[in-house]
Amino acid sequence: GGLVEVQLQAQSLVLTTFAKLLGGAMVLIDYGDTAAGLAGRRGDGTLRTYQGHHLGPDPLHAPGETDITADVNFSALVDVLVEVGAEVELISQADFLNRFDLSERLVEMRTQELTAARQGEVMAQLQGRTMRTAGETLLHPRGLGDFRVLIARV
């Protein structure tokens, strides 16, 4: 009984882009889920507004004053890519980034931050903390780490 956006233009975009690949892969990163995962989140769809980094009012209550967004229905994208013969994988951003050893790099950054602190290099410590925190944010399971990464290989 829930509503899930179909996003027909997104399907067209990925098909057009994928058709241009001679080799390699197309990688898409955004927030969203499969249709089944989205259906349980909101009975009336995923369209919502943000104002000042917080959920905003109904999109029709303050037109032009809020950012409007909707989750990506990755099932719709996966389905059309599989139909044209793509090898498709859908994983979390955290899993994707950890394939490139981001968690291990964050441990190294923490060690560098502590070393800078011990040596009294305050700016280096703060810069290190900023970079480490940014990396941790990309992996957080209740935030950016839960973004989805769609990989479509030729």
Image: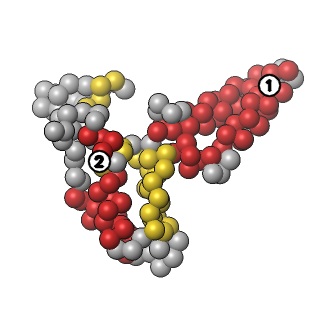
Residue nearest the observer in this picture, 138 or 98: 98
Which of labels 1 and 2 is toward the front? 2
Q: Residues within 10 Å of mark 2 (few under 14, many from 20)?
A: some
The answer to whether residue 115 is left or right of residue 2 is right
Does dot 2 land on a helix, a strand or a loop?
A: helix
Residue beneath the point at 18% across and 41% down: 3
Question: Furthest-left residue in view?
Answer: 60
Return the x and y of residue 25 as percentages of the image width and height: 50, 67
101 over 24 or under it: above or below: above
Q: Could one spot residue 68 in this view of the protein?
A: no
Distance (Cα) linking label 1 and label 2:
44 Å
Image label count: 2
Amino acid marked by disc 1: Leu
138 over 76 or under it: above or below: above
Q: Could one spot residue 23 in this view of the protein?
A: yes
Residue nearest the observer in this picture, 129 or 33: 33
The answer to whether residue 58 is left or right of residue 75 is left
Residue beneath the point at 33% across and 42% down: 37
Res 35 label: 2
Quadrant the N terminus occupies: top left
Quadrant of residue 56 in the image?
top left
Amino acid marked by disc 2: Ala
Does dot 1 land on a helix, a strand or a loop?
A: helix
The first of marks 1 and 2 along the sequence is 2
Return the x and y of residue 60 as percentages of the image width and height: 12, 32
Residue beneath the point at 36% across and 67% down: 81
Res 114 label: 1
Residue beneath the point at 39% across and 43% down: 31
Return the x and y of residue 74 as percentages of the image width and height: 34, 52
The answer to whether residue 63 is left or right of residue 123 is left
Q: Residues within 10 Å of mark 1 (few under 14, many from 20)?
A: some
The answer to whether residue 144 is left or right of residue 117 is left
